[in-house]
Image: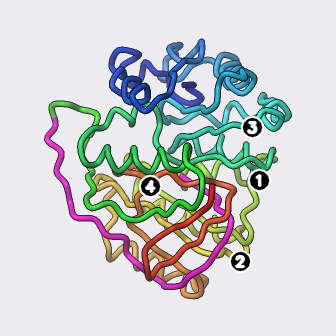
Amino acid sequence: MIAPSDSLQRVGGYDANLPAKEKLEKMGFKVTFGAHVNDVDVVDSSPIPGRVADLHDAFRDPNVKGILTVIGGYTSNELLPYIDFDLIKANPKIICGFSDFTSLANAITAKTGLVTYYGPAFATLKMMGELGDYQDEYWHKAVHETGEITLSPSEHWSSDAWFDPTVTIKKHLNDWTVYNSGVVSGVTVGGNLNTLYLLQGTEFQPQLDDRVLLVEFSDDADYLDFSRNLASLLQIAKHPKALLIGRFAEQVGMSEEILRYTLDKFPILKEIPVIYNVNFGHTPPIFTIPLGQEVTVDTDKKTFTFKN
């Protein structure tokens, strides 16, 4: 477990996340932590050198087979100029997270060619019940199993504070919504749209042309930003293969009418498969999907398929 964005202290520290550790141990994993995951500064992150050191140590250690970020945040792109990408490339292993992890994941893929994974962070693995079962199943399949993996919709979804034990989770029936149909295969790129934007024009920007684009929005974002951020992405991503949009949290204020109005602005989205309300991002449960790997999108079956 490493904290390339916010500190483990921001989500309650070690004790508050014991259920996630215990869950991983029941799956057969041995859980260790970077030396600096509990370091914390005035913005709930931690100094850059410690975060970089934990990342390097995790890739360097032959006993570490997989790396999880503890949670998202705002600051992982600060690390990029100081990362030894040759070290990472020479020691390939699974690394997974979501939200602010977008900048780190896509930069690693861009600089090394390695596949990274957009899925649960350590703190989110303490989610229990039906929503947690879906998340656990698809995370385990993506990072542990071999062969063909097919991602499909969960039965329910929620926009409540799953991390607060005093909150009663309200579940909604789930369905992925097709804006434009089709079947296509292509290499994935993306994640949190607000964070992906931070890489544009830098040496860490991933290959965006001829890609399956994944975009989702933070739960504290303003829906008005979605249109202009998507416009920016589509202006630099030439010949996209497909667009997958993660479900918006209720607090974002995105409505079906506004979303479809936004998508209608872009002619390219009438030419490629586009599907929204998908199980990735900031509304649980979320699946785990590789970045930098070929995925087949089938809007008729409402599935995404890849091979490990």
SS assignment at label 4: loop
Give yes or no for contact between labels 1 and 4 (Cβ–Cβ under 8 Å): no
Q: Residue at x 33, y 19 (%)?
A: 16
- Measure the alpha-carbon separation of dots 3 and 2: 30 Å
Q: In the rendered view, would you say 224 is above or below 77?
A: below
Residue linked to disc 3: 92
Residue linked to disc 1: 201
Name the front one of labels 4 and 3: 3
Relative to residue 73, is residue 178 drawn left or right? left
The picture places residue 106, in percent across and down from the top left corner, at 68, 48
In the depicted view, which residue is nearer to us: 204 or 286? 286
SS assignment at label 2: loop
- The total of numbered circles placed on residues is 4
- Measure the alpha-carbon separation of dots 2 and 1: 18 Å
Mark 2 or mark 4: name the one nearer the start of the chain.
2
Name the front one of labels 3 and 1: 3
Residue linked to disc 2: 239
SS assignment at label 3: loop
Q: Amino acid at mark 2?
A: His
The picture places residue 17, in percent across and down from the top left corner, at 36, 23
Residue linked to disc 4: 280
Q: Residue at x 16, y 50 (%)?
A: 170
Name the front one of labels 2 and 1: 2
- The quadrant of the picture occupied by the N terminus is top right
Give the residues in magenta: 167-191
Q: In the rendered view, would you say 18 is above or below 307?
A: above
